[in-house]
Image: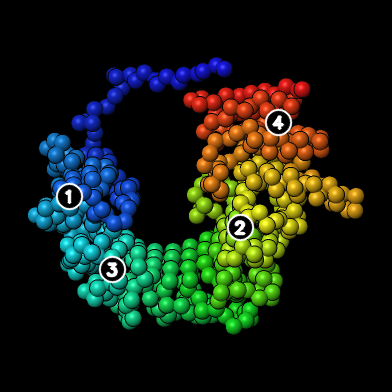
Amino acid sequence: MATHVVRPRTLDRDKIVPVSTLHQDLLWRIFLVNADMDGDATTAWPVFQTKQNSTHEDILPDWKNRALITTWSCSHVCRRWREIIIYSPSIWGRLIDLESLVLIQPRWRAEVLRRTGGSNLTVKGKINGERPTEQEFFTSVLRDYWPRIQSLIVWTSGMPSISNPIWECLRRPAPVLQIFHLMPLQTSTNADIGALFANNAPKIHDFRSQSIKLKFVPSVPWLTHIRRLDVTHPQPMPVQNWLQVLENMPQIEFLNLTWTFDIPRDTETSVQLHLPNLRDIRLCDSLRSCAVFAAQIIPAPGCRFGMTSDFGAPRVPLPQDVTFARQHLSRYIKNWFIDNTVTGFSLSITHIDIDIHEYLDQPPDLLPTLNLSSVRPGELHTLFPFLDIFSSCDFGTITTFQFCISLYPYQSLDSYIGRFLLSLQAVETLHSNRDGLHYLSLLEEVLLEAEHRYPALPHLFFPRLRTVKVLRKPHTVSDMYDLSARDAQSFLAFLDSRRGSQTPVEVLDLTDWNHFEAVDEFNVIAGLKVIYNAGQEIQEHMCGGS
């Protein structure tokens, strides 16, 4: 195998521009880019689980790379840099890093705040309520600088409730506030929070709260500016109340509602709310609540839709709930497929849930997702009919499919799964775990038996399939071990069935596993290329006939 080494290009030193010659405005913009706390690493909870006499690096592993510390260091490089940074309040205003500031001496903390001048402030960090100094510092920032805070992104831990001094600050008008994220780790016990921002926050467009018993009412004026709303465990309200709130949010683009609904008494709907800018909906609640809410929304074309729901008490859906949900959720799924070219798709089934989403090299939260949980393994089969919501979708562009299965021995897949797989006729690459391949073989045997009774139906999954990648997924304890000769024999059943149907697999990719030595087991499949991990390197093996 040839090895190609890519060598770096030789720089022409005559064309290198010394940093010292950069224009002052350009340097200022560079420092402004560095003063972005979005790049700071997220710290784990709690922040202070460290040894005694720990250093800043022990507490915050990325200490030297945090935006505040980088800016502070740059201000000591030379006199020119120092003058640019020190006398730029807009740079320091973006650096109210609660986690870093609480670690430095009070006089330096005060110096950072002094350097912000009268600029707008970006405040971000995690507050451990079990550390009084942290909560006191956070409260002081809100008390002294609230009218200047433009962005507030704060997580709290060890605080059964948000303290009254903090709420008193948050009830004041917020003239420049644009982003507000307040996310306690525990559910807040505050009963009457009152009117946030004194109902006066004319510039806010991004609101996120978690475990705070907020009650949203349509008359709140600042809601009209919201483009992004992300709320978890507020004070629950009926679906119709939430629709009235959204009617006052014509600019909404992203909506995430998690455990926000009172369960409706029935599936009756009364309105059709048109939200032309809404391009992303995420719902997590009972099936009936999600379906009744979604049925009354008309979002933008191609709106991304995600739903998570469990079928446990007291949220066990009735048959009419299932029928209603399939009918109305299919509209969202079809909407997505019409407006987007979907090339990858994923179906994962465990002993209690089903997860379906577009399969791309992106975080799952950026993709449309349907996650349903039966809570009890014996009721898993009640989820399978939901696959019919994809029956009106055109899967002709899907060439990559992920299929991961992890069931108990007494569980099985049924005809709903079979019909769904038969609709994926364009798939060329399959990513599957070991159990997934096993169940595909079982389902294909059922197809062969049904071929004589139903000759008009397709009798083969993935007729264009050429590449199979076996995924190392932590679905079962056995997946923690390397592949063995026994595993190879189990894969052969699937490969043999493909060869017998005149649609042989050409490439078997085992590189997701640490080590594999039994590659010769596949020599019975002539022409099969096996790509595998042979210790320290990836190797290819072309199988010969026997």
Please report whichever mark, 1 or 2, sits nearer to the chain's N-terminal start. 1
The secondary structure type at the circle numbered 1 is loop
Give the amino acid type for the residue marked by disc 1 in the picture.
Answer: Gln
Q: Position of residue 72 (x, y in %)?
A: 18, 44
> Which residue is pictured at 54% across the width and 26% down the height?
534
> Mark 4 = which residue?
506
Distance between the alpha carbons at the discs numbered 3 and 4: 58 Å
- Residue ranking furthest to the left: 107
Whether tag 3 and tag 4 are in contact, CB under 8 A, the answer is no
* 541 to 463, vertically: above or below: above
For marks 1 and 4, give the CA distance.
58 Å
Q: Nearer the viewer, residue 284 or 296?
A: 284
Regarding residue 58, the answer to whether it shows in the image is yes
Q: Residue furthest top?
A: 2
Please rate how many residues cluster around mark 4, counting C-alpha atoms within 10 Å: few if below 14, some from 14 to 19, many from 20: some
The residue under the point 52% across, 67% down is 284
Distance between the alpha carbons at the discs numbered 2 and 3: 36 Å
Mark number for residue 52?
1
**Which one is nearer the viewer's eye here, 53 or 202?**
53
- Please indicate whether residue 464 sits to the left or right of residue 266 in the image: right
Residue 351: image tag: 2
For residue 161, which numbered disc appears in the image? none
Neighbor class of circle 3 (other Cα within 10 Å; few <14, some 14-19, many 20+) is some
Question: Label 3 belongs to which residue?
Answer: 159
Q: Amino acid at mark 3?
A: Met
Q: CA distance from mark 3 to mark 1?
A: 23 Å
Quadrant holding the C terminus: top right
